[in-house]
Amino acid sequence: MTSASSPQPDPAFVREALRRITDSSFVPAGSVPATILTYVVERTLAGDDRSIKAYTIAVEALGRPPEFNPDRDSTVRVAAMRLRNALDLYYAGPGAADPLRIRMAPGSYRPSFEAQDPRSAAAAQGDTEPPAAAEPQRRRSFLSPAHWIIVLGAILAVDLAMTVSLMAVQMRGDTAPYEMQPKPAQKQVRAAEKPASSTIVLERIRQDVQRSYHQAVE
């Protein structure tokens, strides 16, 4: 990056960088930000960057009257803020591979010039590609047979625990309420049905477990 005390790059090189920016839609030629950028760049190339102030920009670049007061009129400050944001967006997009970058530090209207390495921009963009390519691999590993066996085993374990818990609740529910019933015949019928229902549930669980391991049901 260059400053007032360091040598400036080739003016033709800087003007080409300026042309690239003003040809874009981020800082289009004829707009207030483009007018300010062109003014400060040319003044800097002329070796007169120390005279760049909000007042000189307003009067000499934007055509404001000599009585312009930058303390009361924020036109230049607002336009400079928009210009800084537009430059950041431009160099984050179409200008990422430009050989020269023009900056305007916050709080200053003086531009600085920084050489860019196009290979660095390409490498930075390349670093974002492997995660996207690795995403299908993660999905394929998630759908592998070994993973499904683990998931199925967990589901069967939860199902077995819920079934046993439900059976315990049913057994408690079958005895307590019916002991209060005045009809002993109904309690005997319920008690006779419980073994058959429990046997059917346990048999289905056993079959599901055996099917999950591809074993024949005896």
Image (spheres, grey):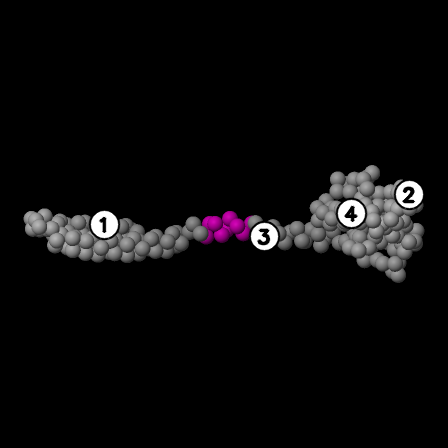
Q: Return the disc, 4 or 1, that comes first in the chain's sequence.
A: 4
Q: Quadrant of residue 59?
A: top right
Residue holding disc 4:
78
Q: Return the disc, 2 or 1, that comes first in the chain's sequence.
A: 2
Marks 2, 1: nearer the viewer: 2
Q: Return the disc, 4 or 3, that comes first in the chain's sequence.
A: 4
Secondary structure under the numbered disc 2 in the rendered image: loop
Which corner quadrant holds the N terminus? bottom right
Q: Residue at x 19, y 56 (%)?
A: 172
Residue holding disc 1:
204
Residue type, numbered disc 4: Val
Marks 1, 3: nearer the viewer: 1
Residue type, numbered disc 2: Pro
Image location (x, y in percent) of residue 163:
25, 53
Q: Return the disc, 3 or 2, that comes first in the chain's sequence.
A: 2
The magenta-colored residue range is 133-141
Left or right: residue 80 versus residue 44 is left
Q: Main secondary structure of the magenta part?
A: helix
Image location (x, y in percent) of residue 155:
33, 53
Marks 4, 1: nearer the viewer: 4
Residue holding disc 2:
65
Residue holding disc 3:
130
